[in-house]
Image (cartoon, rainbow, N blue to C red):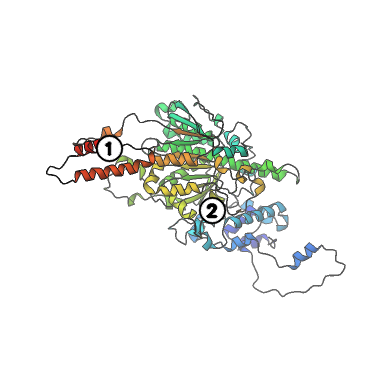
Amino acid sequence: MGKRSSRSQSQLLSTLTKKQKKHLRDFGEEHPFYDRVSSKEAKPQICQLSENSDTSNSESESESEPEEVSGYHKLLATLKNVSEEEEEEEEEEEEEDEDALAEAEMNSDSDVSKEEETAAESAGMQDSNVLPADPKEKDWDEPPGTSQQESPEEFTDTKHESLFSLETNFLEEESGGHCPLKASQDPFLQHVNKELKEREIQAVATNPKTTQELKWPTLGQLVFSSKFQKLETFKPPKDLDLKALYLQKPLESTWTKTNSQFLSGPQKSSGPFTPLQKELFVVMNSYRDLFYPERTALKNGEEVRQVYCLHAINHVLKANAQVLANNSRRRGQKPGVGDDDDFRDQGLTRPKVLIVVPFREAALRVVQLFISLLEGDSKKKIIVSNKKRFNGEYGSDPEERPPNLKRPEDYEAVFVGNIDDHFRIGVAILQRSIRLYAPFYSSDILIASPLGLRTIIGADGEKKRDFDFLSSIELLIIDQADIYLMQNWEHVLHLMNHMNLLPLDSHGVDFSRVRMWSLNNWSKYYRQTLLFGALQDAQINSVFNKYCVNVQGQVAVRNVPLTGSISHVLVQLPHVFQRMEADNLASVIDARFCLSIEMQSCLTRSSTSPPTLTLCVSEITSRRRT
């Protein structure tokens, strides 16, 4: 990217718009998109080199060859003009600092350091790898139903692109010199730095699952299990200190206020967590897989959502802080000094957390919790890009609800707000900033429904399909799993089959920064899965037992119902129950079908006095015994 001609201060003030002035103030030079290019064609000039020229061959070849178009300029060619409405909103939000602008205008292009030019070029190359050059080729990341006028907004948020780029940011710029992740007892560091051996991975397929049961005060009966050799269990602590949980800043101060709505009354003395949240977070923070089948919309649904959002954003902030800290170390390190293995802190792709929720309303609440956890009671508001568009697409209008619609309480709790089940959104997070509608390969957290993911993943044989963004998911959260049984459980199974596969493309990754267990295709053994539902179903249990192979182990809540729900049903007719014998679980369906056929043939048999259901049952039972 060549230097642009310098202009006088008076010329700049008269010709630049407010957006150009802001870019000049931030970067010390005009944006290359607004370069003035002469329409006249330059005449070719022929110059002859002297025979005694001492210039190197590489320099002469670079000068004679035509300049290649960089990825940064290719990206700029795809940008659309911002609408007038957005431009007016940005002008209202931006406060022009004339003193800072005057200082930026006085700096000529010759004063721009080589480090800034290198950072800008690397950011441009990164964006060119993330974003497709042809707008027609990015349909895979467009939410279905989005108009063509709205779709480019997902990829033209250049205002915050450099802010959320982990490759060009440094720790001291983002967190004021705070150096995190120094404690060796941090569960995050213990988990990601744990090294497995080849023989341990090979033995997982043949090792029997080791289990142990414990009784916890709130969660009840817990089953600890693991396919690895060593199974470790623990009991919940009586007192939970926030400092002992290794929460990343600013979560230590914001969590108490965000969770204050659940700490009223007798639970206020239990600390910053409710008894249920305390035990759930202790399991989550140990990076074990968790299956909690007692999450209901009326009772404890919001409590569970609060605690898993805290764990998700804590994980992302720690992972990003580790990358930024290593960026700063590499920046100050002399070339050729040190070991590259010390900087392995990333996966093959950037997305780390996948949150699967059934409706847009749930995604809206998750994002609102993220904003509350980062903002808290601070007077300084965090940067949330594309917030207005997000509220418009994921919010709901109370006037659209039918006025005379009467439904049970559990129906109102589950189907509240926007119940569209086809959506997906990428979220990029730093300590004081959130970027919504980020491209998937520039996002830290993906929030989507099973249907929204299925349309991206596609099926075998389809040309437009992509599942590389699932290759480095370190935390998978599946909330309200019982609702997916009523939607399409096949989408959940399809998603699980494509989790943590090796990507088909590099997507601009620096392989010297990728963790070794990710390069060895062992990411599924380091992925933590949190599964929440309202019931214990065979299909949900199958997903937890088959796809959850975390090296830290699994924890499942297995409370036996004390009273059956059938006792609460009041009808005028007596209930008749017939015990049905089956050899195994797979033959239950066939046995039930055969029994219903026999019952139907017995009831429809021609007779002067038709037999009753009780007689048919006794007849079938005696026939089977003989």
Number of the label disc, if any, that sits on residue 116: none
Residue 218's spot in the image, x, y percent? 42, 28
Residue closest to the far left? 608
Residue 455's spot in the image, x, y percent? 46, 55
Residue assigned mark 1: 624
| Left or right for 72, reference 370 | right
Which residue: 70% across, 51% down? 115
Circle 1 residues within 10 Å: few <14, some 14–19, many ≥20: few
Q: Is residue 464 above or below residue 430?
A: below
The type of residue carrying mark 2 is Pro
SS at mark 1 in the image = helix
Q: Is residue 102 above or below residue 40?
A: above
Q: Is there any visible trace of residue 58 in the rendered image?
A: yes
The quarter of the displayed image where residue 132 is located: bottom right
Circle 2 residues within 10 Å: few <14, some 14–19, many ≥20: many
Residue assigned mark 2: 439
| Left or right for 600, reference 548 | left
Quick one: quadrant of the N terminus? bottom right
Q: Earlier in the sequence, mark 1 or mark 2?
A: 2
SS at mark 2 in the image = loop
Residue closest to the far right? 52
